[in-house]
Image (cartoon, coloured by chain):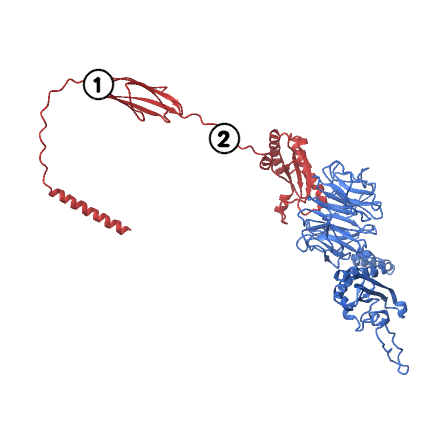
Amino acid sequence: MRRILPWLTPLVLGALFLASGQQEVIIKVMGGAQKPALAVPDFRGSGDAAQHAGVFNETLFTDLDESGMFTMVAKSMFPLEVPQRPEDFRAPLPPPPRRKDAQPQRQGPWLTDWSAPPANASHLAFGYLAVQNEQLVLFGWLFDVTQQDVSNAQLFGKRYFGPLSADGARKVAHEFASDIIVQFGGAPLTASKIYFISDRTGFKEVWSMNPDGSDQKQITNYRSICTTPAVSPDGARLAFTTYARVNPMIFIHSLETGRRLPFYNQVASMNATPSFTPDGKQVLYASTASGYAQIYIANADGSDVRRLSNVRAIEVEPKVSPKGGEVVFVSGRSGPQQIYKMNLDGANVERLTTGEGEASNPAWHPSGEIIAFAWTRGFEPGNWNIFLMDVASRRVDQLTHGAGRNENPSWAPDGRHLAFSSNRSGSSQIWTMLADGTKLRRLTSQGRNEKPVWGK
Amino acid sequence: MLTKKFVAALLLSFAILFAAGCKKKAPAPPPPPPPPPAEAPAPKPNPPMITLFDAEPGTIERGQSSTLKWAVEGADDITIEPGIGRVSANGSRQVFPSSTTTYTLIARGPGGEARRTATVNVTAPPPPPPPPAPKATFEERLAREVQDAFFDYDKSNIRDDARATLTRNADALKAIFRDFPDRSVSVEGHCDERGSAEYNLGLGDRRATSAKEFLVQLGVPADKLRTISYGKERPQCTESNESCWQRNRRAHFAPGQ
């Protein structure tokens, strides 16, 4: 018995680890529990800038909170004295020498106001708004409040300019938030775009919007059905399936000129679900050129077509790993649709999902190690939820839990956010969330909106 | 109302009784006068003689004519009824009876009266051809004669009920293509809302292809049938229940473009 016990212990520990490893994939994407504890007190504005402080504070807080990179310190834990400039910090005087248990003598705001309980912040973003030459100017600083010396605390301090309006307040808030996110190694999303399908004109067209849902713009105008959009890795081209020429086929548009680019479609009843390779030089898609929808690869103009899969089953949605080399796709070769993986030459086909339910919409995480996808496992057909899978270990984490149909997850360039479609509000709309399933945000409301793809 | 009628009837019966009473009281009429003394009878002339009265032809179709011919001797008043009236002793007349008519010739003269009849039988002509039926358009015939074929969830094989439907469709399509040799049909594959939109593009294509192949086996020309998958992009209903899902899992036949 004594001899067995030392062997048994790792087994028991291993079993415990497996049982608690439910969030393993999420942790791999989002990082561990140790996030910077960021305090963001409300900024005030002087003169005419005061009226825009509300919009500014809301925008700044939302951007930082929804980045998922920080533990946002609750405002109720903040000290009463809030600095507005670095020079507001006043080092406390040492305690009077005669009394043994005496506290340091407080002179004004100090770093420990934020780093000590109850705030327990590691970082502080502060500053103020003012008007300069009829422009809105933001003075913003980021301090590491765990430092002993205020001269070592500043991580950056910067001025931001914008028009003296609510939009100007949003602009400087986005820019300041982006700089803070970059400071911690994050990738701000403000410059990225979400492309999606909307029927708000009465026809399904491709639209674009900012990651906060602002600036929704119509991209295509075929007055037909457009669907399954995909963006090139450099964000310059948009590929999609359209019925503009009767049978579904692939069109590619330049997002810079808005013009249609040449793309050769095979003679087939259907060419659909295009996606770009990481270098943007090739396009993968599904075609019925030989019967069942199968996976093909071609040059960016459609030339030099090669067939990658060869089975009597429906296969769609090929997506090449950001690392290249591997393709995930959806196939009905074992029955209900499941997610498979193969090499870029069509070899080494493996099923990734267990065969339970139906699985679709695979989307590679920028790391090339994880996919997000939609799965009906545990639910009736049609009740899709968003899952993450670590492709090497096949471990999965579930991000949505039966609130409507949740489909077409697409990773933000920061690898921490997902856009997806959900009908949880009654009709299909575009939502975003952090890759741990939190910070849900609905971006659209007009018409029915679906199939988001997040581009640079 | 009833009372009024009753009173009226009562009054009437009194009136009748009263009138009868009056008659009884009237004096008896005088006896008739004696007849005049008979004169010596004149020599009686011969009665008129109808030597000819007939219709030629005796049977006509409605709208055609027949000719009445007659010859009478010893009469000074000759009429033909109905509708002709007085005529001369010898003659003929075209008549256009719309139904079978018996004409009567009445000849009166000093010697008396003679009658003879002639009948024109009128037969109904064969009915005219019915007005030409408005020619059904290609679209109308397709909608009326060619039915949707239905499928199981995530399947594209032809079920027994779809087999029967498609067999009827094959005959209908062959007849329609005979009448409209320049037209073609779009075989649309549709899916219910549950599978992913992307996979359903492929599934709809299989359904359209299965339906087309079945029809071609039954002799429908392949070059007249073009397949197209609409996946779940064009549902005909949007309720989330099996009856609506089944309506959407179909091959539909639309005019080709």
Residue occupying the point 67% across, 38% down: B208
Residue A261 location (% of width, % of height): 78, 42
Residue A333 location (% of width, % of height): 75, 42
First in sequence, mark 2 or 1: give its number: 1
Residue A439 location (% of width, % of height): 75, 59
Occupied quadrant, residue B207? top right
Which colour is chain B painted? red
The answer to whether A423 is drawn above or below residue B158 in the figure is below
Q: For mark 2, name the chain.
A: B
* Label 2: which secondary element: loop
Q: Along the line of sight, which residue is nearer the eye, B250 or B123?
A: B123
Residue occupying the point 89% across, 78% down: A94
Q: Is residue B79 left or right of residue B156?
A: left
Give residue B131's mark: 2
Q: Are marks 2 and 1 in contact (CB under 8 Å)?
A: no
The answer to whether B49 is drawn above or below residue A94 in the figure is above
Q: For mark 1, name the chain.
A: B
The residue at the far front in this view is A133
Q: Which chain is blue?
A: A
Q: Could you classify mark 1 by the number of other residues whose Cα lies within 10 Å: few (under 14), some (14-19), or many (20 or more)?
A: some
CA separation in Å, label 2 and label 1:
58 Å
Residue A164 visible in rendering: yes
Q: How many numbered marks, from 0 up?
A: 2
Q: Could you classify mark 2 by the number of other residues whose Cα lies within 10 Å: few (under 14), some (14-19), or many (20 or more)?
A: few
Of circles 2 and 1, the one toward us is: 1
The residue at the far bottom in this view is A98
- Disc 1 designates what residue? B47
Occupied quadrant, residue A125? bottom right
Residue B53 visible in rendering: no
Q: Along the line of sight, which residue is nearer the eye, A314 or A431?
A: A431
Quadrant in the picture for the N terminus of chain A: bottom right
